[in-house]
Image (cartoon, rainbow, N blue to C red):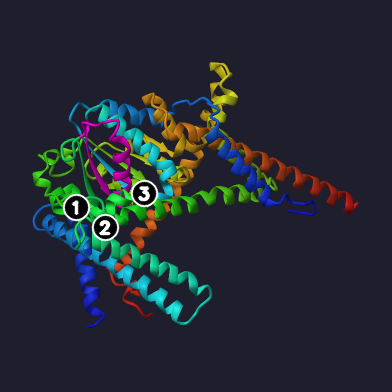
Amino acid sequence: MKRKLPLFITFTVGIILIISEFIPHKPFGQLSGELEIWFLIISGFAILLGQLSLFKVNILKIQFKQRDWQFYIITLLSFITMVTIGFLWGTGKSPGILGHGESISSVMGYKPFDYLFFNVYQHLQATMFSLLAFFIASAAYRAFIGRTLESNLLLIAAVLVMLGNTSLGVFLTSWLPNSLSFLHLPNVSEFIMTYPTTAGQRAIMIGAGLGIIGSSLRIILGIERSYLGGE
Amino acid sequence: MGKSKQIDRRWLFLLIFVGVALPLIFTIGLPIETSKNVQIVYDLVESMPKDSKALISFDYDPASMPELHPMAKALLKHCFDKDINVIFTALWPMGVQMAEDIISQLQDQYPNLQYGVDYVNLGFKAGGMITIQSMGKNFRKVFPEDTNGNKIDELPIMDGINNFNNINFVFSLSAGAPGIKEWVQISHDAYGRPTSGGCTGVSAPAMLPYVNEQKQLTGLLAGLKAAAEYENLLQAPGTATSGMDAQSMAHLIIIIFIIIGNINYWRNKKSDKKGDR
């Protein structure tokens, strides 16, 4: 029963949702609408579950003093700080349990949660993302080596797209006459992105789509059961 | 990469830093040319009559701000200039703050904007594609209240908006999933609404297949370049325009280093051959 009931629910819900795509009328239309709302409610709980999981995983790492365990303390402290001040004074125009915290906001210019979000979190995330520029530059220098015909093609395409996607590309070839506009770097870049890149991307998407259909059918029909845990 | 010495990557880091920082301080003013996809997005907004309803979804977080924020700002400016009413939603939790930040930046330029009349922030809903699907069936079930706790039935901007049929166009500013793909598959493919999007430069190849004859995506704003082009079309240069000089310099430095790397490789190969003989 412990395994059969979830399999039965999965099968029934899956079949109803598939049928409702083809017959969006009573009762399937209403049923799928209700099921979608249930999904949204469950998604809300999933966020809570994620937060509890984050808490548990970090506490275990600190408890057993795993490598760099000090960093996990910072994660937990940051998490607790944000959740607490969010609960106490709210965010944006939404009040917390202590109201809007006008006296604190008048000093900080923002509510405490928003102050930390805009002045700490936002900049930390932007910094992390900006670091990518340095690592991509270093990786490109090491990886884009024309060893074979294929790597040469990749190298040439990469350089053309890199130039074409900047104002420098416009600047370098803007002098070309109209009859040679196909050599204008932004046009070359657009051609590479629109045809070869998009063709490859479509092939990947079709493959992934077929894979999703296959694995969804396996789950609905109860062939794939790993989501139930165990073997 | 063979025997020849590789350049210490810290030199590369330093050059990238200088190459990005200097053009941000001293503007070069390299030319900006409008690409086809950006023009299509511009024309879509331009073709909207006064008091149209646009649904703009903020599906990104602060990590993608440098690319998507200028784009969002330019798009909203265009909407407000055209008197288009804007409904904000977010499929990413941080998207709510992103929308609020843009509005606070635009408040000086548009002092007469009224919350609930000209724009509304419905906030974040978990669920990705299912959220969009439910919005298509009944807006009010998914968003009974806005992000400030106001009942959406009491907001004038939401009058008569029950599902996607009452929205003139949908725009997703997306840094990943859920984002543009999910909006295309539901708001355009299932409900036939004109749908467009803005994404980071790296995710553009994954979105381009949707810009096709069927107009699954009506144009696409891809990366900082598209944001700069949009600012240029609006004749309102902003952070994207100044950022393009920096991006150009960074790309140029990377290309120079790729050339140096290849010269090193070929020199090594040549010396290896000589050694073999």
Label 3: chain?
A: B
Q: Is residue A174 above or below residue B97?
A: above
Q: Looking at the image, do the residues carrying marks 2 and 1 touch, with CB atoms under 8 Å apart? A: yes
Tell me, for residue B60, which label it has, or none.
Answer: 3
Tell me: A48 left or right of A28. Answer: right
The front one of A27 and A75 is A75
Going by the picture, which residue comes out furthest to the right?
Answer: B277
In the image, which residues are magenta?
A: B84-113
**CA gap, disc 3 to disc 2?**
15 Å
Classify 10 Å Cα crowding around label 1: few (below 14), some (14-19), many (20 and above).
Answer: many
Q: Amino acid at mark 1?
A: Ser
Tell me, for residue B127, which label it has, or none.
Answer: 2
Classify 10 Å Cα crowding around label 3: few (below 14), some (14-19), many (20 and above).
Answer: many
Please identify, in this view, whether the residue under mark 3 or under mark 1 is nearer the observer. 3
Label 1: chain?
A: B
Q: Is residue B184 visible?
A: no
| Residue tagged 1 | B134
**CA gap, disc 2 to disc 1?**
10 Å
